[in-house]
Amino acid sequence: MLITNDLDCNAAMNEFAVRFKQHRVSAHITQKELAEKTGIGLRTIIRFEKGEEIGLLTFVKLMQGIGLEHNLENMIPDYTKRPSYIANSGNLPKRARKKKVNAAEWKWGDEE
């Protein structure tokens, strides 16, 4: 199953859990070994693999524990690697804001 905008949060979390467990098992790492390696509680790992919520820091540690930390880059890519960043001469926006509507361009609905 692809993780896309069509999935709700719970379905996406379940898919993450299934994929994580597949990687852990294929790496021949038991849940107990992973708990010892990462310092994450065994119960937390069991809960995560059942699709329950865990914290982001715990997720990152688990990804590191099975050697998938390089995939974290794909979750939120580096903005400075985007063509739009380069086209804007390397200027990052400071904050998001809505564009103002010019009052001279505003019309009542029946004036068109």
Image (spheres, rainbow, N blue to C red):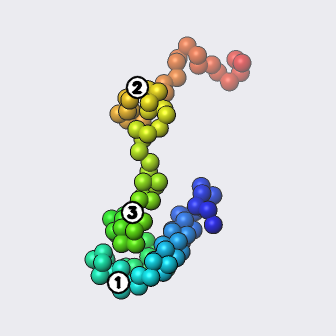
Q: For this rendering, which residue is in front, 97 or 106? A: 97
Residue 34 in the image: state x and y as whole percent: 36, 80
Q: Looking at numbered disc 3 in the image, what kind of residue is underneath it? A: Glu
Residue 75 in the image: state x and y as whole percent: 46, 55
At label 1, counting other C-alpha atoms closer than 10 Å, the crowd grade (few under 14, some 14-19, many 20 or more) is few
Secondary structure under badge 2? loop
Q: Residue at x 42, y 54 (%)?
A: 73
> Which residue in the structure is indicated by mark 3?
69
Residue 21 in the image: state x and y as whole percent: 49, 77
Q: Gap in Å between the C-alphas at discs 1 and 2?
A: 48 Å
Left/right of residue 98 with respect to residue 106 in the rendered view? left
> Which residue in the structure is indicated by mark 1?
33
Q: Quadrant of residue 12?
A: bottom right
Q: Residue at x 41, y 85 (%)?
A: 30
Count of numbered tags: 3
**N-terminal label among 3 and 2:** 3
Q: Gap in Å between the C-alphas at discs 3 and 2?
A: 31 Å
Q: Quadrant of residue 111?
A: top right
At label 2, counting other C-alpha atoms closer than 10 Å, the crowd grade (few under 14, some 14-19, many 20 or more) is few
Circle on res. 85: none
Q: Is residue 5 above or below residue 88?
A: below
**N-terminal label among 1 and 2:** 1
Q: Gap in Å between the C-alphas at discs 3 and 1?
A: 18 Å
Secondary structure under badge 1? helix
Q: Looking at numbered disc 1 in the image, what kind of residue is underneath it? A: Glu
Left/right of residue 99 with respect to residue 2 in the rendered view? left
The N terminus - image quarter: bottom right
> Which residue in the structure is indicated by mark 2?
89
The C terminus - image quarter: top right
